[in-house]
Image (cartoon, rainbow, N blue to C red):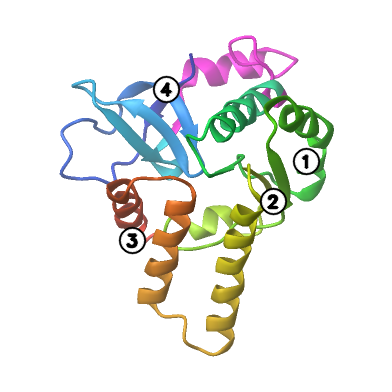
Amino acid sequence: MQKIRVIKKNDTDSLEYEVGDILSVDSTWYGGVNVKGRSGIPLSLDREEYEEYEEEAQQTQSNPDGKVDGIDPYSYRLGVMDCFCEMVSVGLKTLAMSHPFSDRTERDGYLEDVKRLCGKYEVLFYPEDEALLTALFPKQENQGKPLFLFYRKEETLEKYLSLKKEQKSLMAQGLYTEEEDRRLAYEFGRLLSYPEEGIRRLIEKGNGKQ
């Protein structure tokens, strides 16, 4: 199981984790990882709050194949996308996103396997060049990063693209305020099937980090 070391604590009021804690990763999300805190309750950590645990980093450096716990990076990312496709397929998520990639070449290297996964779970995909940038996720970490979107119904993609179009229009008119950014963040979060409280926490975590 992948482990991380906490290097920064954004939620200063939380008693569930501290800088230096080593935690096991339960799952990943677009902006970081999900772990369990000291009392066992689930926590979502932003990417800037942690680093890969040193033992795993050393293992990666010593392994010429770049594998961590026997899993190469390509297979790991594909496994995450497999999980998201299944969640979309059974209705747990309306829209899901892959990890962001460094560039389109890296993303498109997964294309054939993504087609296979979507055929397996009977879902659709869309190669996106940059996700909708709102207060929901750290903008600097996701700006210009391509990814895949997964969904079941075309209307879901249409809704997502309409949010991007609305944002672009507001920006062009000079009307894209902090309030509008927050509103679109909530719309985006709902499309990703996040609960309202989860959306609120993600936005609060992102304050001051854009």
Q: Earlier in the sequence, mark 1 or mark 2?
A: 1
Q: Which residue is mark 2?
A: 146
Q: Is residue 183 left or right of residue 80?
A: left
What segment carries the magenta color? 51-74
Q: Is residue 116 left or right of residue 9?
A: right
Q: Which residue is mark 3?
A: 207
Q: 194 or 58, which lies in front?
A: 194
Give the total of numbered labels. 4
**Residues under labels 1 and 4: Cα distance?**
25 Å
Q: 69 or 164, which lies in front?
A: 164
Q: Nearer the viewer, mark 3 or mark 4?
A: 4
Give the amino acid at mark 2: Pro
Q: Which residue is mark 4?
A: 26
Give the amino acid at mark 3: Asn
Quadrant (top left, top right, bottom left, bottom right) of the C terminus: bottom left
Task: Please provide percent x and percent y for residue 158.
Answer: 64, 61
Q: 73 or 156, which lies in front?
A: 156
